[in-house]
């Protein structure tokens, strides 16, 4: 199973993961420059790593998330989430043109809700969930 995950991750990086991770890194850089938004930058870095190498990992709800995450997600949605989500949608459309890209297009669309509302979630190994 690890070989399949490796192959999928390498194909993902080549087809779309690298460019999407750059988008998240740019959002993190902007958040770090603005100082007040450093928690958003940390969340964006976490997502950049997940978007770069997603297979074999999953996202789970953070049990300690509360009202702060909700408010933060609203702020994130307004300033960064929508354009990252658009990046996932446009990348999915481009991937869906090819047969080999269809599964990756679907995986990209699954990342849209996470790009819109990243706070209150943790990225963990898929083995930890089982």
Image (cartoon, helix red, strand yellow):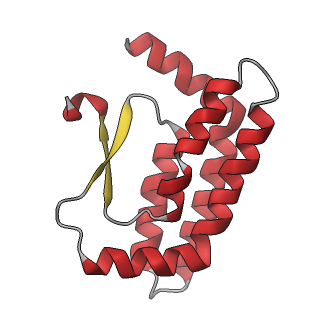
Above or below for 98 versus 31: above
Q: Is residue 126 left or right of residue 27?
A: left
In the rendered view, tell whether residue 90 sits above or below residue 80: above
Q: Residue at x 17, y 60 (%)?
A: 63
Whether 15 is drawn above or below 68: the answer is: above
Query: x, y percentage for residue 14?
Result: 69, 30
Residue drawn at 73 percent across, 44 percent down: 91
Work out whether residue 36 can be spotted.
yes
Q: Which image quarter holds the C terminus?
A: top left
Tell me where residue 43 sits by quadrant.
bottom left
- Number of residue marks: 0
Closer to the camera in the image, 16 or 90: 90
Residue 13 visible in the shown view: no
Residue depicted at 53% across the width and 43% down the height: 110
Tell me what residue is drawn at x 63 percent, y 30 percent: 104
x and y percentages locating residue 100 in the rendered image: 71, 18
Point out the image quarter for the N terminus: top left
- Residue 79: percent from left, percent from top: 60, 78
Q: Please name whichever residue, 40 or 94, is drawn nearer the observer in this view of the structure.
A: 94
Q: Is residue 124 left or right of residue 63?
A: right
Q: Is residue 105 above or below residue 61?
A: above
């Amino acid at each position: 199973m690890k070989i399949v995950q490796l192959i999928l991750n390498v194909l993902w990086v080549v087809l779309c993961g690298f460019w999407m991770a750059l988008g998240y890194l740019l959002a993190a850089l902007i958040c770090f420059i603005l100082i007040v938004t450093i928690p958003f930058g940390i969340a964006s870095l976490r997502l950049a790593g997940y978007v770069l190498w997603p297979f074999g990992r999953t996202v789970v709800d953070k049990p300690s998330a509360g009202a702060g995450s909700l408010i933060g997600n609203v702020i994130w949605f307004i300033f960064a989430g929508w354009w990252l989500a658009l990046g996932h949608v446009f990348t999915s459309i481009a991937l869906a043109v090819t047969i080999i890209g269809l599964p990756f297009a679907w995986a990209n669309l699954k990342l849209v809700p996470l790009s819109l509302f990243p706070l209150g979630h943790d990225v963990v190994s898929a083995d930890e969930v089982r």
